[in-house]
Image (cartoon, rainbow, N blue to C red):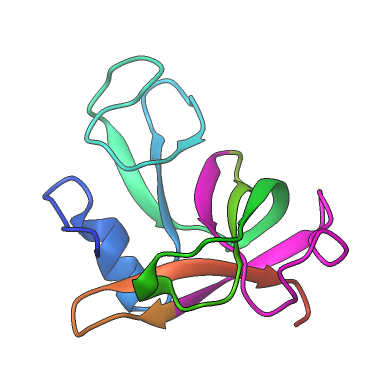
Amino acid sequence: MLPEPTPETRDFWDGCKAGELRLQRCTACDGGSYFPPRPFCPKCGSRKVEAYKASGDGVLWSYVINMRPRPDMGTEPYAIAVVKLAEGPQMMTNIVGCPQTPEALKLDMPLKVTFAAQNDDISLPFFQPAGA
């Protein structure tokens, strides 16, 4: 099951395809960056929002290791994580590039975004340990 881009999320998915993590921010209230994408500011309701290329940096905020993966996700356990982005918002994703164990997945560990093409239209953002 892959996401279906909508007019509100198209820029985000186009960014992922191009290898960029794109966030949005309000230019009316300086309410900061937000995620998920939407056509209005979640703080003031203004439609004066802009998309921009984020750093792709974050830290592991929380996670759970799924020990019973779905058939389309392989046979190995994998981490379902919440990453706190350097720009402020939190994003749900998967952690890749390291063992999927509590010993390897340390809270507050620095992470960097990476992208994996799923088909011609969708690339998913995952996070891996910074420096990996």
Q: Quadrant of residue 44?
A: top left
Residue at 75%, 72% (x, y): give it.
130
Residue at 32%, 44% (x, y): give it.
50
Q: Is residue 102 above or below residue 121?
A: above
Q: Residue furthest toward the top?
A: 44
Number of on-image labels: 0
Residue at 51%, 47% (x, y): give it.
91
Q: Is residue 29 above or below residue 24?
A: above
Q: Nearer the viewer, residue 86 or 71?
A: 71
- Asked if residue 67 lies in the magenta stretch, the reply is no
Q: What segment carries the magenta color? A: 89-115
Q: Residue furthest toward the left?
A: 7
Q: Nearer the viewer, residue 88 or 28?
A: 88
Q: Quadrant of residue 97?
A: bottom right
Please give left or right for residue 8 compared with residue 103 in the image. Answer: left
Q: Position of residue 28 (x, y in %)?
A: 36, 24
Q: Nearer the viewer, residue 108 or 18?
A: 108
Please give left or right for residue 127 compared with residue 108 in the image. Answer: left
Q: Position of residue 77 (x, y in %)?
A: 61, 68
Q: Quadrant of residue 112?
A: bottom right
* Quarter of the figure that contains the N terminus: bottom left
* Quarter of the figure that contains the C terminus: bottom right
Q: Position of residue 38 (x, y in %)?
A: 26, 37
- Asked if residue 107 lies in the magenta stretch, the reply is yes
Q: Nearer the viewer, residue 70 or 25?
A: 70
Q: Position of residue 114 (x, y in %)?
A: 54, 75
